[in-house]
Amino acid sequence: MVSFIDDIQLCSYHKLNQIQVKMDWISSVLGANFSEQMQRLLMIHEEHFHRLICYLEQNDTKSEKSHTLQLFAGCELKDDIQVDNRVHLAWDGEDLFRRDEQQGFWIFLKPIGYILKPAVESAFWDSVRKHYMQEYCFDIMRKILRYSRIKENVPPEVTVSRHDALDGTITLSCTATGFYPHSILLSWEKGYEHAVWGKESSRGTLPNADGTFYLQVTLELLSGDPGTGYTCVVEHSELKTPAAYPVPEKPTKEKCWAVALVIMTVVILGVSCALAFLTRKEKKAGEQPCKTPEAK
């Protein structure tokens, strides 16, 4: 079992490592007995899953020697209002059935899923599902959001840069940092077209020390591309509309000479001040103190 809220992992369970809470403050928010209660509950579910696997594999026509049964359950809150909840059951990585909460019925996607149709559509299973969603999804999420700053959404800070290598290679970089929640989309645009004109790379969205996130996407352009007209488009839940950040143009020779001149001027002034200071210090050291005439 792996539990997330807004793409932040809260806790996990493995039969060898038992239940692991990822952040200490979660245990204090959910209560001292939370881990023990979840441990007992998951061990019971583990037995039920083994029985269900044995039942389903008797009716599976495939020849695999081992099978995987996965349960996906999620719920959504907006301004403390229960918006949606969903349940999927997957067999060997393929959904057997899922719940359409808006329509109020189950959708069966695989023939083997129809074997469980009478149980899934029963009033008993419906009451159990609602109870579990309320207690272990909605209520837990409310407690966490009430006592933590995890609900404070922050828009990204974006910087775009350009690097021209000596061999003529041009690399564009778009960096978004300090944003929350985790989900974000960075894409390249040239003119009015969304596409990739080169080799795009990224290490993915990474966490910052303050609980926010960081993402950098680079684009190495094709040979001969001057790198003009590019824009980094950022989409995030805290941005009302996608934000566009143009890539800076390549500095002209005049700008390069101006920058070089400023740097040389600063260096010359710095050296001149240092030499003047040393000369004055040496001059003072060479001066002899005046002798006061002795009184006769």
Image (cartoon, rainbow, N blue to C red):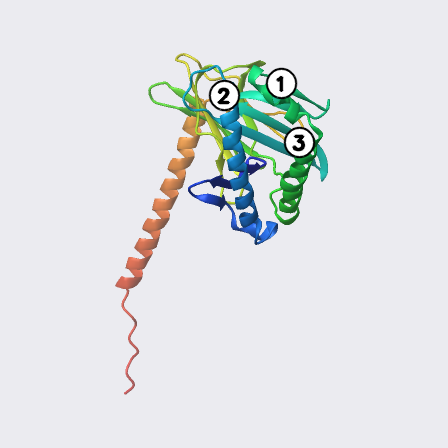
Q: Nearer the viewer, mark 1 or mark 3?
A: 3
Q: Nearer the viewer, mark 2 or mark 1?
A: 2
Q: Position of residue 100 (x, y in %)?
A: 68, 23
Quadrant location of the C terminus in the rendered image? bottom left
Circle 2 residue: 58
Circle 3 residue: 125
Residue at the farthest bottom position: 296
Q: Secondary structure at mark 3?
A: helix
Circle 1 residue: 108
Instruction: Check disc 2: other Cα within 10 Å, few if <14, some if 14-19, many if 20+.
Output: few
The relative height of residue 252 versus residue 22 in the rendered view (above or below) is: above
Instruction: Check disc 1: other Cα within 10 Å, few if <14, some if 14-19, many if 20+.
Output: some
Q: CA distance from mark 2 to mark 1?
A: 19 Å
| Amino acid, disc 1 | Phe
Q: Secondary structure at mark 1?
A: strand
Q: CA distance from mark 2 to mark 3?
A: 23 Å
Q: Position of residue 64 (x, y in %)?
A: 42, 19
Q: Is residue 87 left or right of residue 282?
A: right
Task: Choose the circle earlier in sequence order: 2 or 3.
Answer: 2
Q: CA distance from mark 1 to mark 3?
A: 16 Å
Instruction: Check disc 3: other Cα within 10 Å, few if <14, some if 14-19, many if 20+.
Output: few
